[in-house]
Image (cartoon, grey):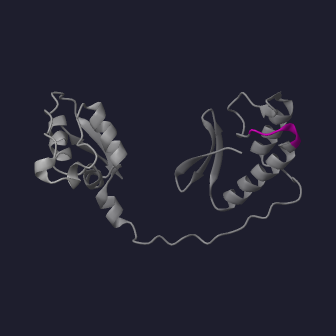
């Protein structure tokens, strides 16, 4: 899905002095800010603002090319992959999730979180859970029940759609179509 495009500093210098940075960045597949940062790191002087608007005789002289030999790399989306995507993605039908009035038969992850949140110290008004062995949630003691209800509803409804939930030291993850999403309430 991604490819790496590489340039020598001398190639990049030639390109930025032949083509406006905005257009060059678009051709490469990066933002103009990202391209400018990469050039700065490589010691490549960019044309000043308004350079391309001036007639060629009024433009400042081109500086000397950099002597660096470090390769400049950009990780960009592969245009071939992008061309295979449908022109217009059809949005999924929206679906509202009805939250039950109270918690009934909570999911095991929610049960573990409730126990930990109730026992946790209060820091700056919130339950402070130190371990990565629980659902992520920064909640006041008065809102533990509401947060548990929200998590329980989300977990149960998303599992009906085939999504998986897990807890890791990095955080609470929901796996949607093979992609990991970090979740925090």
Q: Nearer the viewer, residue 36 or 93?
A: 36
Taking the spot 17% from the left edge, 46% from the top edge, the residue there is 15
Query: Can you say which quadrant of the picture contains the C terminus?
Result: top right
Query: Residue at horizontal 28%, vertical 46%?
Result: 49
**142 relative position to 50: left or right:** right
Which residue is pictured at 10% across the width and 49% down the height? Answer: 57
Measuring from the top left, give residue 10's x and y in whole percent. 15, 37
Determine the residue positioned at 55% across, 47% down: 180
Q: What stretch is highlighted in magenta?
A: 138-142
Q: In this view, does 59 lie above or below 158?
A: above
Picture coordinates of residue 14, whole percent (x, y) = 14, 43
**Residue 171 in picture, x, y percent from top left:** 63, 38
Nearer-the-camera pick, 104 or 170: 170
Q: In this view, does 22 lie to the left or right of 142?
A: left
State which quadrant residue 94 falls in: bottom right
Q: Does the magenta stretch include residue 7?
A: no
Residue sitting at the far front:
58
Does the magenta stretch mainly form a helix, a strand or a loop? loop
Marks counted in the figure total 0
Q: Where is residue 159 in the image (x, y as percent from the top left)?
A: 68, 57
Residue closer to the observer: 92 or 57: 57
- Residue nearest the observer in this picture, 37 or 45: 45
């Amino acid at each position: 899905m991604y490819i790496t495009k590489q340039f020598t500093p001398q190639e990049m210098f030639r390109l930025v002095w032949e083509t406006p940075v905005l257009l060059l960045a678009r051709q490469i597949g990066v933002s103009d800010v990202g391209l400018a940062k990469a050039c700065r790191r490589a010691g490549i002087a960019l044309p000043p603002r308004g350079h391309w608007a001036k007639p060629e005789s009024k433009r400042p002289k081109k500086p000397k090319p950099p002597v660096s030999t470090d390769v400049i790399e950009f990780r960009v989306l592969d245009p071939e992959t992008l061309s295979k995507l449908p022109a217009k993605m059809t949005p999924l039908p929206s679906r509202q999730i009805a939250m039950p009035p109270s918690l009934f038969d909570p999911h095991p992850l929610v049960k573990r979180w409730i126990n930990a949140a109730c026992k946790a110290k209060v820091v700056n008004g919130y339950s402070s859970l130190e371990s990565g062995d629980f659902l992520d949630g920064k909640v006041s003691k008065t809102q533990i029940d509401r947060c548990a209800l929200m998590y329980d509803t989300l977990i149960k409804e998303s599992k009906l759609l085939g999504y998986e939930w897990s807890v890791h030291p990095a955080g609470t993850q929901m796996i949607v179509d093979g992609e990991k999403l970090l979740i925090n309430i």
